[in-house]
Amino acid sequence: MRPQASAKGFADLLAGFRDKLDRALAVWLDAKRDEAIAAGSPETLELIDGVGRLATHGGKRLRPALVYYTYRACGGSSDDAALPLALATELLHTYLLIHDDIMDHAEVRRGLATAHALFRDAHREHALYGDPEDFGRSVAILLGDLSQSWAVELATGVAAGAVGSRELARAFAAMCQEVIGGQYLELLVAQRRSASEEELLRILSLKSGRYTAERPIQLGALLAGAAPEVLGALSRYGTAVGEAFQLQDDLLGMFGDAGTLGKPVDADLREGKFTFLIHHALAKATPGQRDALGTALGNPDATAAETAEARRVFSETGARAAVTAMIDERLRAARAALEGLAPDLAPDGRLFLEGLIDYLWERKQ
């Protein structure tokens, strides 16, 4: 199959799945609203709607789609079994995004005001007592906690009825813990303004390789009862595509389109996110180029001219090309891992996994 056809097949499958997940999410939110009303807890409705506002507004749905289509690829056929687990990964992601926005002091997510900004502004609008910023952050923390509790509720319910319940529960718990560990290390190196290559590779693995793809793929495969050798190959594939996806996001966050991203271009630079792009640039930069990077990195008040100059440094030092090469290496590794499995995978699931690689190749362009 030509890459363009494979990528289109992937896009069609993702769109079809997104519709299914959105319907499942709407049913879940309605049920939670009914529970809150029955419990005589109308204030909880505000929290439910706060989570639902972000969860229902856009998002690629890649992680839950990987759960679903890996389950299908490994012979699973029950949407009633797969969709709750897929929804658990999406609600886990919603929780992490809400808390991530607090840590990044972000004002926009998916084209909407972030949760803490929304409730900060509501505090001001209603002339409440206390600090609006503190109120906004506090409510956003609660929203994230609520979304995470739902994710655990769904995953626990699926694991209880699955054949490999212990392995499934362990994989979901590991995904939660790993991404938090990766987030802490990313926060730490941003504050230090320095990182070893080994530390950056660990962040890439924990926050992206495992969280974005490897663990969701494992969840789908475990739910379907996949053999250990299939699980191993799928894990190698997942690590590679997950890391490639994040490296592309780092490039898009610096050189992409703000409308497509749903947040300002160069936001990562202003926030001080220490990525491989920064690492490679600093390794090759002249003193003047280091000064240009230092002026913009971690500076929320950096001017457009200062961030543009920093972006030029990424190209001039070869950092942009170095990250592109890292992406290419990982996409080749993902294809190699999948090729040996292709005959053993069901057609629609195989098409999705193959198409994701081709989609990432096209996205890179």
Image (tube, rainbow, N blue to C red):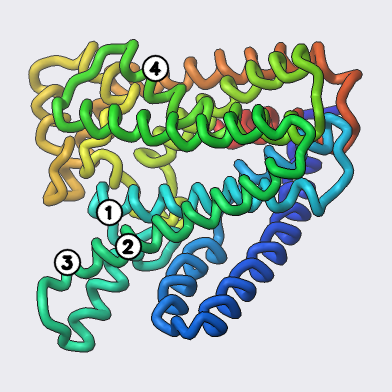
The residue to which callout 4 is attached is: 201
Front label number (4 vs 2) = 2
**Residues under numbered marks 1 and 3 in contact, where contact means CB atoms less than 8 Å apart:** no
- In 3D space, how far apart are the residues under numbered discs 1 and 4 (Cα atoms)? 24 Å
Say the numbered circle drawn on residue 102: 1
Place of residue 210 in the rendered image (x, y in percent of width and height, measured from the top left): 53, 27
User: Residue flagged by tag 4: what amino acid is it?
Assistant: Leu
The front one of 240 and 325 is 240
Name the N-terminal-most of marks 3 and 4. 3
Above/below status of 30 relative to 263: below
Q: Residue 140 carries which label?
A: 2
Q: In the image, is residue 262 above or below residue 314?
A: below
**Closer to the camera, 314 or 168?**
168
Q: What element carries label 1?
A: helix
Residue 315: image location, x then y, percent: 32, 25
**Residue 311 found in image quarter:** top left
> Residue shown at 70%/34% (left/top)?
165
Evaluate if marks 4 and 2 touch, with contact meaning CB atoms under 8 Å apart.
no
Within-10-Å neighbours for mark 4: few <14, some 14–19, many 20+: some
Q: Is residue 274 found left or right of 291 in the rendered image?
A: right
Mark earlier in primary sequence (1, 3):
1
Rounded to the nearest angstrom, the CA distance separating label 4 from label 2 is 30 Å
Mark closest to the chain's N terminus, 1 or 2: 1
Q: Which badge, 4 or 2, comes first in the chain's sequence?
A: 2
Which residue: 16% across, 87% down?
A: 127
- Quadrant including the C terminus: top right
Q: Give SS at disc 2.
A: helix
Of badges 1 and 2, the one in the foreground is 2
Instruction: Please give the label number shown on residue 133.
Output: 3
Q: From where the camera sits, is residue 6 visible?
A: no
